[in-house]
Amino acid sequence: ISIQEAFINENDLPISSQLICFDLSIFTICDIRSIAYILRCMPNLRHFKFLHGTRTIAHSCADTFVNGYTWEHIFEMCTPFLSKFHFHISFEKNYPKLDLDFVVNSFEYFVKKYPKWHMIIDRWAPENRNTGK
């Protein structure tokens, strides 16, 4: 079965200029472009909270979600008034492992722009269920 990507006319998105605070929780497969489309509809957004959790994620999507340069571009283009944001992203990713140095360095923009901004990255390996223990 082939799933075609939905056509989105970027010039015909609904705009909610009065919305200044938005919490978004997604517990299924999605891509960063979908998040950008949603944020683009809220040009005056000041506070954004994003929670994303899924067990399965494509390698390219995983790398994109934890790339600070991507988030910087989205926030600058879609939400220029954003002053506060939280995000928690959790997914199961097998190989290859994330380059944590790259991830941390990619968020340097946020450390400079938001002096009290903190970032926590945690990586852990689940128990091997095949050991019989």
Image (cartoon, rainbow, N blue to C red):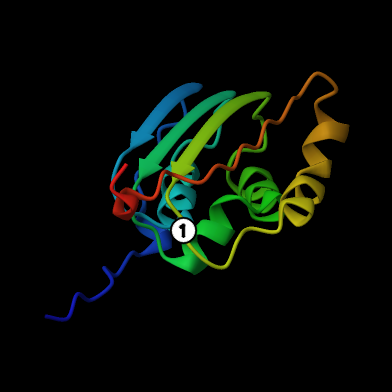
Q: Where 93 sits versus 108, above or below?
A: below
Nearer to me, 39 or 101: 101
Identify which amino acid the numbered label 1 is placed on.
Answer: Arg
> Which residue sits at x=49%, y=50%?
36
> Which residue sits at x=28%, y=48%?
132
Residue 19 visible in image:
no
| Residue 84, x across and y down, in percent | 64, 22
Q: In the picture, which quadrant includes the C terminus?
A: top left
Q: Which residue in the rendered view is the most extreme toward the left?
A: 1
> Which residue sits at x=83%, y=33%?
111
Q: Where 84 sits versus 64, above or below?
A: above
Q: Splitting the image into 4 quarters, where does residue 44 fall?
A: top right
Q: In the picture, which quadrant includes the N terminus?
A: bottom left
Nearer to me, 1 or 82: 1
Nearer to me, 23 or 117: 117
Q: Which residue in the rendered view is the most extreme toward the bottom?
A: 2
For label 1, the SS is helix
| Residue 58, x across and y down, in percent | 41, 65
Q: Is residue 49 left or right of residue 56?
A: right
Q: Splitting the image into 4 quarters, where does residue 19 fall?
A: top left
Q: Splitting the image into 4 quarters, where does residue 9 fall?
A: bottom left
| Residue 54, x across and y down, in percent | 34, 46
Q: Which residue is mark 1?
A: 33
Residue 1 visible in image:
yes
